[in-house]
Amino acid sequence: MVSALKSVGAMLGAPAQGRAKSVEEILRPLARLDAHPRSLSAIYGTERLPFYTEGTQAGLNLRKPKMELTPMFHHIVERITLMKPTGWTLVGLRLLSCANPAEQKAIERNLNKVRAFVRRNYRKPEHAHTMVVQPPKKRKAPVLFHLFPEE
């Protein structure tokens, strides 16, 4: 089997060294924490790879799935990308991982309620103006939405 793979490889092009500086390497899926940070194992661990990844390896032109965002989440991501405040990539990552599309809609509904409350009560020092979203443990970091009255 190995000699057959070497023959196919020779037909496809010249051998190239991998990360271990060898032309031949044994690839084993690893747990995420044990994997090289730029490897597929670091992303997927020992779970099944997404179809688009496997298809690309097989020469198929498959599109990577796009994240579904509600209009409000899309607008926030656009603003963060344009303004690029300190830590903006981490802020974007936390925002994008805090909620699936259905959860985003619920967050948007609740933010609209908080926004209406801020508009009515912003002059009172004790008014509510922040909403905290605590994603499931798998996604970790809480996200805070802090609302200000429009000027």
Image (tube, grey):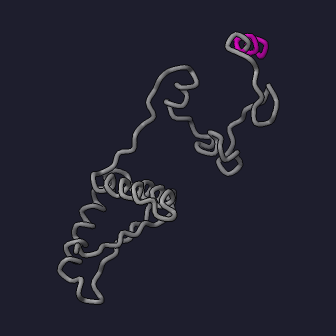
In this rendering, position of residue 147 left or right of residue 96: left
Answer with the quarter of the image where residue 76 lies: bottom left
> How many numbered discs, if any?
0
Answer with the quarter of the image where residue 127 lies: bottom left
Work out which residue is located at the far bottom of the displayed protein and give it: 125
Q: Is residue 49 above or below residue 100?
A: above
In magenta, the rendered stretch is: 2-9
Which sits in the foreground, 75 or 94?
75
Q: Note whether residue 57 is visible.
A: yes
Work out which residue is located at the far left of the displayed protein and give it: 120
What residue lies at 62% left-to-right and 43% top-to-bottom?
A: 45
In this rendering, position of residue 133 left or right of residue 60: left
In this rendering, position of residue 123 left or right of residue 81: left
Give how far across and how far down residue 28 sits, in percent: 72, 35
Magenta segment, prevailing SS (helix, strand or loop): helix
Q: Note whether residue 136 is visible.
A: no
Q: Is 3 part of what is drawn in magenta?
A: yes
Answer with the quarter of the image where residue 15 lies: top right
Give how far across and how far down residue 149 sits, in percent: 24, 75
Give how far across and how far down residue 57 sits, in percent: 58, 25
What residue lies at 19% left-to-right and 73% top-to-bottom?
A: 116
Q: Is residue 127 above or below residue 134?
A: below
Q: Is residue 81 above or below residue 61?
A: below
What residue lies at 47% left-to-right and 61% top-to-bottom?
A: 91
Q: Quadrant of the C terminus?
A: bottom left
Which sits in the foreground, 92 or 1?
92
Give how far across and how far down residue 39 sits, in percent: 65, 40
Q: Is 18 part of what is drawn in magenta?
A: no
